[in-house]
Amino acid sequence: MHNISTAWLTTNYTCNCKCDWCYAQKMLAKHRNMDFKHAKQIVTYLQQKEIQTITLIGGEPTIYPNLIELICYIKSLGINVRLATNGKRLKDKDFAQQLIVSGIDEINISIKGTNEHEYRQNTHQAGLNYMIQGYNNLKQLGFKPSISYVITSNSTEKFDEFVKLLLKEDLDDVVIQFEKPSL
């Protein structure tokens, strides 16, 4: 498998948001977490196939109960670990510190709106301020996260507001994503 260097591992179908565009929307209602023993088996298999990077996704992987142990296990096998998150849980500085200590290589935080109202409209939860606080916690701890922003059919006209938010909050290392096509 020398041509395949990265695998994505879905740790759970549980989330602290309910994003309108989420690919896992139907599964989230089941509130399922991957058995930790099974997760380790998958990681071991991927290591045997010479996978160099595993990206942890969910639902929301930061609420996966075995996240820190899973990251430590992946790192013990010499594999890089990325995390795709909404960043809300990173507002807890102790948790952010645990992620860093676990050896996480990259954290990408997805912004779900350009202001708290839009964030709540898109996710049906509060969270923009939590996400910004989490981003700042990581930076204060010496870790540089990246930011992603999903452009939806409802948000294309808000791109200028997104750029203003980036500048105001000093958010950088940005990736732009587009929502899935819909009928």
Image (cartoon, rainbow, N blue to C red):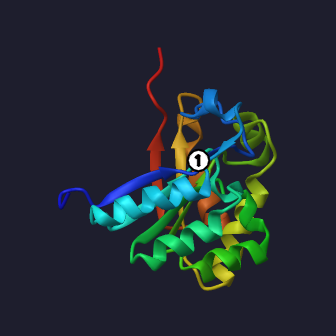
Residue 77 drawn above or below residue 44: below
Q: Is residue 135 above or below residue 31?
A: below
Helix or strand or loop: what does disc 1 sit on? loop
> Which residue is tagged 1?
58
The N terminus, quarter of image: bottom left
Q: Is residue 138 visible?
A: yes
Binning the other alpha carbons within 10 Å of mark 1 as few (below 14), some (14 to 19) or many (20 upward) gives: many
List the single residue furthest toward the left. 2
Residue 33 in the image, given as x and y percentages of width and height = 65, 47
What percent of the width, then of the height, locates residue 174? 48, 60
Q: Which residue appears at 27% of the width and 66% of the height?
A: 50
Say which of 58 and 72 sits in front: 72
Is 72 or 155 nearer to us in this picture? 72
**Residue type marked 1:** Gly
The residue lying at 32 percent from left, 68 percent from top is 52
- Taking the image as drawn, is residue 171 in sight? no
> In the rendered picture of this protein, how many numbered marks are placed on residues?
1
Compared across the picture, whether 143 is left or right of 128 comes to: left
Q: Quadrant of residue 134?
A: bottom right
Frontmost residue, 73 versus 4: 73
**Residue drawn 49% across the image and 34% down it:** 179
Give the x, y percent position of residue 7: 37, 55
Residue positioned 38% across, 65% down in the render: 53
The image quadrant of residue 14 is top right
Q: Residue furthest top?
A: 183
Q: Is residue 56 above or below residue 121?
A: below
Q: On the rendered structure, is 25 left or right of 120?
A: left
Quarter of the image where one finds residue 129: bottom right
